[in-house]
Image (tube, rainbow, N blue to C red):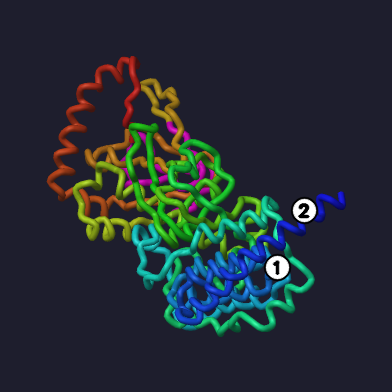
Amino acid sequence: MVKTQVIQERAVLSAQVQLAPAAASFERAVQLAPDDVTLRQRLADVYLRLGRKTQAIRELQQVADRYARVGRLLRAIAIGKVILDLDPGHQQTQEALASLYARQSETLPFHEPRPVSLASGTHEFVETAPIDLESLAVFRSALEGRVALPFGDDDSEAATGAGPEMSAIDVGALPGSPLFSALDHASFNAVVERLTLRWMTAGETLIREGDHGNSMFVVVQGTVNVLRGQPGADRLLALMTEGAFFGEMAVMTDSPRLASVIAATDGLLFEIHRDALAEIVAVHPSVKEVLAQFYQQRMLENLLRVSPLFHPFSLEAKQEIGECFVRHSLPPETVILEQGKPGAGLCVLLRGQCKVFHRDAEGQPLPLPPLREGEVFGEISLLLDGPCTATVQTQGYCEVLELPAGDFKRLVLPNDEVRAMIRRIVSERLSRTADLLDGRVLPDFIV
């Protein structure tokens, strides 16, 4: 036991002898380029290896400060989370994280959730060096117990003579982050407190289509691809970068993932688990409403981008169409569309499940596959300007987005390519009518 301790002490002394010159070199470099976040992260790395945790934390505070100054809120919070992991009682960092949002709220207008642009994280940032993942890996290893670091009793004394003081965080020019900008101060702090910092590696599957999800994510650094379909035959739906968030739909609705998300680069994410989110919502109900609004916009964005019905339209035209959708909260057993009657509009099922059935000539119901979250219905009766061929009824409480028939006819039907689509649908329907009446097949389009 004594021998092992002696060996460890000698290893620590050897590392300190080798790293001390590196620390001195980085300190000189930081003095020459005080705003270089990469140099400061590497200096913090060396300090941590030397067992000078207080000095390492001071450098990380400076890194967080500089990210905040240029509008990199998520990177600033990520560095703050590392500091708190190193020293959970570090009150100065906790107060700085709170002030990041409080001062942002004073200088920026509230951001309403909007489709496409904000939800995809396509906002502008001031360019600055990214978080140094190699240096951060040292902190990660230390926090996970894979590397023993020589934190000695003289750590605080070693810090008194070196290391710059943390300056006040200035976020006057901080741009809004899509998700966080829509939260009030108390909700923001509650969410940030429960965020977990997660590394991602290029090619890693973060979310798999069809799986049930237990957490949602925010991109801190790096890029992810959103894909739908079977591997090898999937197609790219979106590319998400810093500030974008994903996975909230499955967490909000307890439904299967509608797409896969693959890391395109190495990077960092924030992850928040379903249980943590539920605890936050119990105290701060506004968080659920904010996520519900973004969920609605995400579903609408997916519909406008993926549905062949909207392929002929420009981004501006899709934006105009999207703004006409209306949200309905419906109780159980509500008839949304009724066989033989005109359709109300083009609908998207946000939450819940709807049963679908067709009544034959004798009035007997023929059950059809139920509608699930994310599915679209009502377009056929609108395209053909005729009655619905089946009835759609809510099974439980449902949330539905509807493009009213008047707006559909005004904004969608005049398009030449849409009219060509109508002609194809009419031809397909006529060819199936005899089989349907004979009861041999059911239509794959129903309403």
Mark 1 in CB contact with mark 2 (< 8 angstroms): no
The residue most toward the left is: 416
Q: Amino acid at mark 2?
A: Ile
In the image: residue 27, left or right of residue 411: right
Residue 212 sits in which quadrant?
Answer: top right
Assign a secondary structure to mark 2. Answer: helix
Q: Nearer the viewer, residue 391 or 217?
A: 217
Classify mark 1: residues with Cα within 10 Å, few (<14), some (14-19) or many (20+).
some
Verify whether residue 301 appears in magenta. Answer: no
Q: Is residue 33 above or below residue 436?
A: below
Q: Where is residue 187 shown, x and y percent of the image?
A: 60, 68
Q: Which residue is mark 1?
A: 87
Q: Residue at x 32, y 43 (%)?
A: 343
Q: Nearer the viewer, residue 4 or 145?
A: 4
Q: Quadrant of the C terminus?
A: top left
**Which label sits in the foreground, 1 or 2?**
2
In the image: residue 308, left or right of residue 121: left
In three-dimensional space, the C-alpha distance between marks 1 and 2, rounded to whole angstroms, equals 28 Å
Q: Is residue 360 above or below residue 305?
A: above
Q: Which residue is mark 2?
A: 7
Classify mark 2: residues with Cα within 10 Å, few (<14), some (14-19) or many (20+).
few
What residue span does the magenta drawing correspond to?
327-356
Q: Residue at x 66, y 83 (%)?
A: 161
Assign a secondary structure to mark 1. Answer: loop
Verify whether residue 338 appears in magenta. Answer: yes
Q: Is residue 106 above or below residue 277?
A: below
Q: Amino acid at mark 1?
A: Asp
